Amino acid sequence: MNSKNLLTRTVAGIIYIAVILIGILGGKYSFISVFGVFLAVGLFEFYRMVEKNRSHAISKVFNIASGVLIFLSAYLYLENICKIALPIISILYLLILFVSVVFTSQKDILHTIIYSVFGQIYITVPLSTLMLISYQHQTLSNTYYYAFVLAIFVFIWVNDTAAFMVGSLFGKHKLIERISPKKTVEGFIGGIVFSVLAAIVLSSTFFTDYSSAFWIGFGIIAALFGTLGDLFESLIKRTYEVKDSGSLIPGHGGILDRIDSLLIAIPAIYIYLSIILVS
């Protein structure tokens, strides 16, 4: 990588991180704005990938708009503004898909339905769950709070950076070569170790409301399922023979390439928090 490309990648990465931090730390409206845009772009990139070699009967615009509406309805639910919006919009989306099966003559319509629903499960559900996590702080009932959301990103970034560095320096054994030839067992272990270290630092300095054990468990789950998310998106890209999901972020690819680790880690963290905070 030449110096110009490295500079472009570095600047783009800094801007991306800044946008994320603004979205998280700026409050609930900033969160909705930033991650709502991420959701729309992520859905666009996903549906563009699956339509790479064929034209599907169901409009990308419909799928993207439906995903954004589901995301916004999750906010209405959490704020007790409209409890029925989330189930109604979700069910209405499915009903429209079912109707399209009857009135569309395209031969692969069932595959199109599957792709449409999977896009929502893969991207809309995790990002909507991230909003649920932002309201899950035990001392702030029904109020947006950034701690858990920021922690997810910190652990994902620490895991990714440590896995890359340790893998580059000491990696000899491939993790799952058929999906991601560059990932190594040593890098995977290094990512988990540094995530645990980050958890200890967080518990003793910034987020002292919870124990070190709580944050260590949080960090390990984020690292494990974050790696799984990265591998899963790599599998999707290999299936559709694309290098990157998009080109929105110079030197980094698309939005999906940046949030792939989050999409699997978020549901796992939500389950972890639901169990730990209730018990």
Image (cartoon, grey):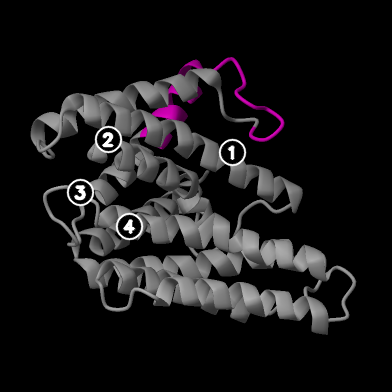
Please identify the residue farthest to the bottom as the structure is shown.
Answer: 103
Position of residue 274 relative to residue 67, above or below, is: above
* Residue ID at (49%, 77%): 89
Residue 211: % across, % down: 15, 29
Mark 1 residue element: helix
Residue type of the residue flagged with mark 3:
Ala
- Does residue 111 belong to the magenta stretch? no
The label on residue 147 is 3
Camera-nearest residue between 8 and 147: 147
* Residue ID at (43%, 72%): 86
Per the image, the residue denoted by label 1 is 231
Residue type of the residue flagged with mark 1:
Leu
The quarter of the rendered structure image containing the C terminus is top left
Residue type of the residue flagged with mark 2:
Ile
Camera-nearest residue between 106 and 161: 106
Per the image, the residue denoted by label 4 is 132
**How many residues crowd mark 1 within 10 Å: few (<14), some (14–19), many (20+)?**
some
Query: Which dot, 2 or 4, sits closer to the camera?
Result: 2
Residue 73: % across, % down: 39, 74
In the rendered image, is residue 264 in sight?
Answer: yes
Position of residue 211 relative to residue 64, above or below, is: above
Per the image, the residue denoted by label 2 is 276
Q: Which residues are magenta?
A: 159-180
**Which quadrant of the structure image shows residue 64?**
bottom right
- Disc 3 or 2, which lies upstream in sequence? 3
Position of residue 116 relative to residue 152, above or below, is: below
Residue type of the residue flagged with mark 4:
Leu
Contact between labelled residues 2 and 1, with CB atoms less than 8 Å apart: no
- Disc 3 or 4, which lies upstream in sequence? 4
Query: Which dot, 3 or 4, sits closer to the camera?
Result: 4
**In 3D space, how far apart are the residues under numbered discs 3 and 4 (Cα atoms)?**
13 Å
